Image (spheres, grey):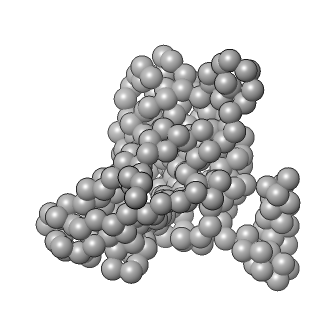
Amino acid sequence: MNANIKRRLFIKGSVAAGTLGAAAGAGLLTPQTVLAKWSESAFHAKSSATALKNLLGSDAAEESSAIKIKAPDIAENGAVVPVSVTSSIPGTESISILSTGNQTPLIFNAKLGPGAKGFVSTRIKMGKTGDVVAIVKANGKLYKASKAVKVTIGGCGG
Amino acid sequence: MAKSSIKIRAKEKGGVTTVKTLITHPMETGLRKNKKTGKLIPAHFIEEVTCEAGGKKVFVAEMSGGVSKNPYLSFKFTGAGKGDEIKLSWVDNKGGSDSATAKIR
């Protein structure tokens, strides 16, 4: 219930940027600000494009070879898939990890503060075989890289 | 005192501090069913992990239920030296939280 209201407010806020008052007051006009609040509309989005738009303001990302994804080719257990992303793009601000096969593709978004290196490593769940996509935001632009991971046992269902 | 849910290792080498951490958390997506009752298990996952060093936020990770149970997280940053303290804290979607500090070695 509460979540829905928040989402409404968020949409309102992002569409009508002029009406800053209400949205900013509710602390919801923050998806693009570094070190902002958890972005519910992005993490609950059912498609990668929507998730990225809600999180970073755009889903137009350029392929980049400066992003390296380390993940297994075949994940025997989809519940635990180790993923490391290294970005050598200067001025990397954030690294997001998505799994295209998941019901809610956006899994992880790391916001890098001053001094943080373009590197993050974690373990994710993958519902089924799909691509692990890394989106890097640097200097206001988005870059991406992806890697196909075959999942033999899904990690999201029962 | 209850055992901390966070384990941290922070190591400095050549000016770069590598932080590795393990957090004990169920990370329920809210999409999984309880096999016995057939009911959905309510979502319970960490939304945000924050790392502070020297009073500054150096790294913030936002997560969804798509991160594995007992999340592992590793990252690197510069600007801290051996003996400095880092603080790591997390908040989950039910308002639960925990924090821990560690010295960089």
Q: In this orientation, does residue A62 appear?
A: no
Give the residue at the far front of this rendering.
B1
Residue visible at 55% across and 51% down in the picture: B46
Is A22 above or below relative to A117?
below
Q: In this orientation, does residue A99 appear?
A: yes
Picture quadrant of residue A57 = bottom right
Q: Position of residue B76 (x, y in %)?
A: 30, 61
Is B33 above or below relative to B15?
above
Is A61 above or below relative to B34?
below
Q: Position of residue B41 (x, y in %)?
A: 68, 33
Foreground pick, B85 / B19: B85
Residue visible at 33% across and 66% down in the picture: B101
Foreground pick, A42 / B26: B26
Q: Relative to residue A153, is residue A82 drawn left or right?
A: left
Q: Relative to residue A100, is residue A124 drawn left or right?
A: left
Is A123 above or below relative to A140?
above
Q: Relative to residue A129, is residue A68 drawn left or right?
A: left
Picture quadrant of residue A8 = bottom right
Q: Quadrant of the C terminus of chain A?
A: top right
Q: Position of residue A109 (x, y in %)?
A: 52, 55
Q: Position of residue A80 (x, y in %)?
A: 44, 31
Residue visible at 49% across and 29% down in the picture: A79
